[in-house]
Image (spheres, helix red, strand yellow):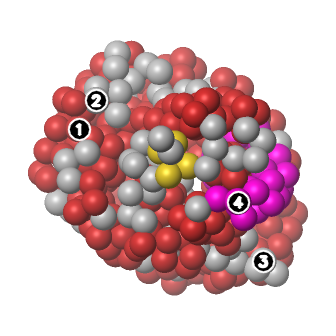
Amino acid sequence: MSCRDRYGYRLTTSPEATASYNRGIGDLLRLRTGAVEALATAVVLDPTFALGHAALALLGQEMCAPVDVAARLRDALLHAGRATERERSHVHAVDAHLRGDSRPLVAHLAAHPRDALLLSTAVPTIAFAGVTEVPAQAWAIVEGAIPAYGDDWWFCGLLAFVRQEQGRFDEAMSLSCGSLAEEPGAGHSAHARAHAHYETGDHEAGLSWMDRWVTGAGAATDGLSHFSWHAALHELSLGDLDAVRTRYDGQLRPEDTMGCRALVDSGSLLYRWALTPGAVDVPGMAGVAAAVGPDTLARPATPFLALHAAVALLALDDGPGLVALADRSERHDHPTQRDVVAPLVRALVAMQAGRCSAAADALAALTSALPRLGGSDAQREIVEETRIAALLRAGRLDEARTLLDLRLDRRRSPRDRRWRESCRG
């Protein structure tokens, strides 16, 4: 009997390596701890297992897992020749994706939609940055896979995330709650529900539910800091800065946060907290910089990480670091790094130098291009908040009020209401 993955595709490896690989993919789909260790065990059990090597390379690049990406990718390509056509296509898709070309991955999913690892990779969620630069393209990939998955609990969580991005919040809540009823620890479903609460301004209920989940069914989730970030975002929106401080001290200190999450979760919270009217004694960004290391700030692996590296450098008042990042982005092989990251960082260079009016204009010009960075609407709001801060510092109060009015039209936020009140001339 041939070895099969969790969704029925054949694997060219041993039964023992298959069991470890499936355990690792299961942990990854649940966002549970142990995925990297299980996948590493799979390639120890079978060093010729191409998909095991490819999965580790993917997690090293996308999730900052402690993996030698180049070595794992080399071994995946070396051993793919002995595998099935589907496995060869999978390895080729990962190789191309890590080199900045995601077209083979999209084509692979059209032929093999139940390749759950690569479907997860394709969609910008908590685990991966995504492979498309227009949200509707990612939505189409997921919706095209509906017949292949039906009411599978993991897929329903992924579809729930799409539905909340589309503004179909009732459907998102129904899908995520149904998935969680079947698999209470389903991280993607919990994540989709967190976004639905936030985007509808349902801060009190969202905060209460998240606090229960992270200490209950979600306690084994890998990277709980992102769920803590969601809870803190509710507290920030409510203007409860004492709760934000308690949350940060207890759950989001960068020295206790793994890898890139220290930048994306702890760093972004500190930055947005510091912009909040009435915020005092906000911890500095130095701890985040120490946790992620200078290479992550100077050479972020993805456009999404580059966004967060840039705002961290701005918070550090590191003008030379921002200029170097902008220069490197302009020379980057990836078009999003050149077309979106570089001008974004140049805008922050201007802001750091005190040219806030120019920074605000440059950030405004990038608004329609921001989805290309990956991540969620809630995460990319950090750019909008930077633009508001730039307008305020430039004395352009009417424009800042207009932006805040638009935000308040989207969702209730006592913080934004207070911010708007601070715009009086």
Mark 2 or 4: in front is 4
User: Which mark, by number, is residue 82?
Assistant: 4
Q: Is residue 70 magenta?
A: yes
Mark 4 or mark 1: whose residue is earlier in sequence: 4
**Badge 2 is on which residue?**
183
Mark 2 and mark 4 residues within 8 Å of each other at the beta carbon: no
The residues bearing labels 1 and 2 have C-alpha atoms spaced at a distance of 6 Å
In the image, 164: left or right of 6? Answer: left
For residue 368, side relative to residue 389 (left or right)? left
Residue wearing tag 3: 332
- Residue 354, how many percent across, how many down? 71, 67
Q: Earlier in the sequence, mark 1 or mark 3?
A: 1
Q: Nearer the viewer, mark 4 or mark 1?
A: 4
Query: Are dots 1 and 3 in contact, CB under 8 Å?
Result: no
Work out how far the residue at label 4 is from the one at label 1, CA to CA, in angstroms. Answer: 37 Å
Residue 275's place in the image compared with 84, above or below, is above
Visible residue check, residue 311: no
Q: Earlier in the sequence, mark 2 or mark 3?
A: 2
**Boundaries of the magenta span:** 62-83
Residue at 73% from the left image edge and 38% from the top image edge: 46
Q: Nearer the viewer, residue 388 or 278?
A: 388
* Residue 122 point in image, percent of width and height: 48, 63
Q: Position of residue 295 (x, y in %)?
A: 85, 51
The CA distance from mark 2 to mark 3 is 41 Å
**Disc 1 marks which amino acid?**
Ser
Asked if the residues shown at circle 1 and circle 2 are in contact, with their CB atoms under 8 angstroms apart, the answer is yes
The residue under label 1 is 179
